[in-house]
Amino acid sequence: MTEDLWPVDLQPVQPVRTPVGLLKEQAALLGPKTDNILEAYVSTHKLEVKFGDESFWTRFLIVAPTLEYHYEVFSITYGITLYPVRTESGEILNDENELKSFLQRQLQSDKTRKVVGALIAQVRDQSA
């Protein structure tokens, strides 16, 4: 008879919000904020070449569908254990709270505001 050596409960000890889940939550909010002129999209890819423990690459994109235009706001990498997360600038985010703080800084940055405003203006001019 085979002895089962696996733990009885294989579920997370506490609920875990994944990096991609947090990004998708924020992505879903952009459309309604822009009267659906813009959308945000999260794209995750498995890295073929591992860099340390990181094995997933996730991009956060702003999309103007009528312009067929995509703008990458930022990208992150992380391993199978989800945290820490590494930003494209090399910043290490050790947990969900640090990732949320990073997201807020990125989404509220002057550059992101300018890009969103410029894309909205271009879409409106195109449809006028």
Image (cartoon, rainbow, N blue to C red):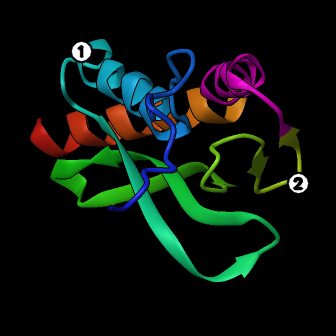
Q: Give the camera-side residue of 59 and 116.
A: 59
Circle 1 crowding by C-alpha within 10 Å: few under 14, some 14–19, many from 20: few
Whether residue 117 is visible here, answered yes or no, is no
The quadrant of the picture occupied by the N terminus is bottom left
Span of residues in magenta: 93-108
Residue 3 screen position, x and y as percent: 43, 55
The kind of secondary structure element at disc 1 is: helix
Q: Residue at x 58, y 26 (%)?
A: 113
Whether residue 125 is visible here, answered yes or no, is yes
Q: Amino acid at mark 1?
A: Pro
Q: Amino acid at mark 2?
A: Gly
Label 2 sits on residue: 90
Q: Residue at x 11, y 40 (%)?
A: 127
Label 2, label 1: how far apart the Cα atoms are:
32 Å
Label 1 sits on residue: 32
Circle 2 crowding by C-alpha within 10 Å: few under 14, some 14–19, many from 20: few
Vertical comparison of 53 with 123: above or below: below
Among the 4 quarters of the image, the one containing residue 99: top right
Image position of 57 (left or right of 119): right
Q: Main secondary structure of the magenta part?
A: helix
Q: Give the camera-side residue of 81 and 128.
A: 81
Image position of 122 (left or right of 99): left
Identify the disc placed on residue 58: none
Q: Residue at x 88, y 54 (%)?
A: 90
Vertical comparison of 30 with 2: above or below: above
- Mark 2 or mark 1: which is in front? 2
Vertical comparison of 121 with 63: above or below: above
Residue 54 screen position, x and y as percent: 71, 63
Residue 61 screen position, x and y as percent: 44, 48
